[in-house]
Image (tube, grey):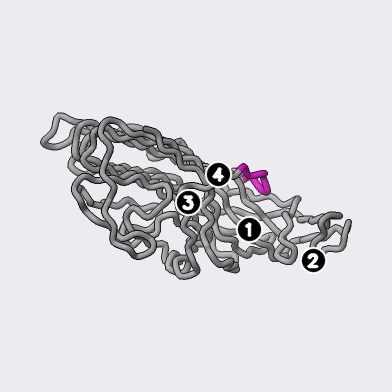
Amino acid sequence: MTKLHAGLIHLGALILLLPFAAQKAVADSISTFLNSTNAVCSQSGTVVDQTATCTVIGSAGSLSMHGIAGYGNLAGSAQITNATAQADVVSVFQENISVAGVGTVTCPTSPGVVNCPTGQVETFPTGSQLNASVFFSLNGSWSESNASWFYMHPVTQVTVNGQGLLQNYTGAPGDEAFNQDCSNSGIFYTNPTGQVVRYVPCSTGTTSGAISAVLQSVPVTFTVGNSYTLGASFDLFLQCQGSCTGNFLDPTLSNIEITDPATGLPVQGLSVTGDTGTVYPVNQAEVIPEPPDAIYMLGVGLLLMAVALRRTVLGKAVGQPHVRSRMA
């Protein structure tokens, strides 16, 4: 049986524009963290491309993990075979970026835009305040085979100057559109509407699926010519009793959409460049997949909680490893 999820996650049921001031530069960094429970592991590779092969304690089964981190590109995969175990693969990047150039907007002839006379060219030099949203592509696959329970959560976070802008984990187990959860133990969880419901039973045999999505951050206000610290993390959480996999070759930062706050029109002519020379894509055309089975629009309350950049259930800040137990 195959289950396909595809869609756009736009965090923020209410439009909330947060102004950012330039801040003192922090160190650029990329890294990966591989963590496991109930296993003894041997790790190899580098801090930006790391692999672990593990023996599961008290079992003939095995566990493997792989994490890759680059500026604008993150990846993680994990596999548990015939065992009761947990894997957590975290990939992180942080880089100081600058927004430069003279932006322009040409007012369209049709259908017409308020505050933008037809054919007029608006310019946005250094010091202009504009809006920006960050887009990440998310593509991967998952499977479980003869599992008594199975939990697979892909978690993407984006920050600017330490402010959380995209946090696709709301804090309650099983409440994300792209989480894959099942359990034959008859346990319950609280869904996004506050209802206490039972996990669906795991299927007999093998179940697999694909995930394809575009994740969009809430918009923020920034100043042309200023520098900012852009950070992102991808956290793949995998746990099962049986056999299961999660494989994500991204997320990849696919677009920074810069717009004029007065008209909402895209601003051309600006560049976003990192200290390392990374050139980030600006105002690229986004191909938005069809909506998933469930899209949860988070309100201002969650966004304000994300300021502290803490996931209460996961118990860690962005970019720091964590150990999370469910095992039932």
Q: Earlier in the sequence, mark 1 or mark 3?
A: 1
**What residue would you read off at disc 2?**
114
Q: Earlier in the sequence, mark 1 or mark 4?
A: 1
- What's the magenta region? 281-287
Q: Nearer the viewer, residue 4 or 251?
A: 4
Circle nearer the viewer, 4 or 3: 4
Q: Amino acid at mark 4?
A: Glu
In the rendered structure, are the residues bearing label 1 and label 4 in contact, judged by CB atoms less than 8 Å apart?
no
Q: Position of residue 273 (x, y in %)?
A: 63, 48
Q: What's the CA distance linking mark 2 and mark 1?
A: 20 Å
Q: CA distance from mark 2 to mark 3?
A: 35 Å
Circle 2 — which element? loop
- Would you say residue 282 sits in the magenta stretch? yes
Q: Residue furthest right?
A: 119
Q: Pointers 2 and 4 in contact (CB under 8 A)?
A: no
Marks 2/4: CA–CA distance: 30 Å
Q: Which residue is mark 4?
A: 290
